[in-house]
Image: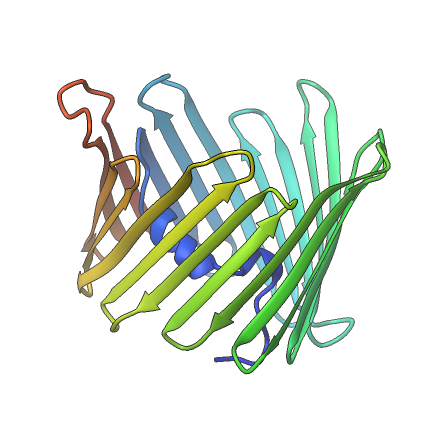
Amino acid sequence: MTKIPPKYDDLGKESRDVFGKGYGFGFVKLDLKTKTKKGVEFKTNGSSNNETGKVFGSLETKYKFDDYGITLSEKWTTDNVLSSDIVVEDQIAKGLKLEFDTTFAPNTGKKSAKIKSAYKSDYVHGTADVDFDFAGPTVQASGVVGYEGWVAGYQAAYDTSKSKLIANNFSLGYRSSDFQIHSSVHDASKFMGSIYHQINKNLEVAAQLNWNTGSSNTSFQAGCKYDVDKDSCIRAKVNNSSHLGLAYTQKMRDGIKATLSSHIDTKNLNSGGHKLGLWLEMEA
């Protein structure tokens, strides 16, 4: 394992990926990725909600100036929102990443801007972000320290317009090459714990617990990802509400991958409400 700990938002990410990646219940999605000879990347996303019929799409371009550590990207969505992003990494100082993100909606005239920064080195990974708003900016900061597999982190956000702390989160965990355990407390009201284990190169399993103060119920879910071979994999997850999620991903050929997923309420098999999803990814 690297000596550099992950940033706060990535703590427990391996477990969350087992439950989140590869599922698209209730949607038909299409992703297209291409790259020119000069290194300009184009990414087109489209999705249709099976319940509402709403279609959403976006077009993103990205170009990296490797010699200068700069990445430029622009995105335009069917909601008519334009966004631009500039990332500068390892230029001012080794391990320092700066990001400037702006959005503009021509229909409403609404604008937003964010400045994000992150610094990582052995045993430390910190971030500081400012979300500008006409009423007053929101400042968010986090820090993670790690030593011999143990990681501890703290994250806070302050709304200057309300002079109020709006996030106050703690995390503690242990990471090894094949096993990770993570726990966190959000605003002293939401408690979460997760375990991730890579049993072998083909099989990953995870479990997650959540509990909110004021509630006597604890939510639980378990899931796994199994690589059948280099071209296909199966995902499955189930929670304590007897909701079963299944997904199958198949590489059709180089650059083309299809995923079929389903969400089944096993307590009400005959009453409907089940969801299907289809996701096609193409890359050239």
Q: Is residue 255 visible?
A: no
State the image quarter where residue 51 is shown: top left
Q: Image height check: is 107 above or below 99?
A: above
Q: In which quarter of the image is residue 266?
A: top left
- Is residue 274 visible in the rendered image? The answer is yes
Tally of numbered tags = 0
Q: In this view, does 57 lie above or below 127?
A: above
In the rendered image of this protein, does residue 225 appear above or below residue 266? below
Q: In this view, does 194 lie to the left or right of 169?
A: left
Q: Percent x, y for residue 210?
A: 45, 46
Horizontal side of 51 relative to 103 (left or right) equals left
User: Residue furthest toward the left?
Assistant: 270
Which residue is at the far front?
216
- Name the spot of residue 157 as percent of width and height, x first: 74, 46
Work out whether residue 131 or residue 6 is closer to the camera in this orientation and state it: 6
Identify the coloring: rainbow
Q: Is residue 162 left or right of residue 131?
A: right
Q: Residue at x 65, y 51 (%)?
A: 169
Q: Nearer the viewer, residue 130 or 160?
A: 160
Image quadrant containing the C terminus: bottom left
Residue 240 location (% of width, % of height): 30, 40
Give the residue drawn at x 58%, y 25%: 80
Report the side of 222 relative to 99 (left or right).
left
Q: Which residue is drawn at 26% across and 56% down?
A: 224
At x 45%, y 31%, the residue is 57
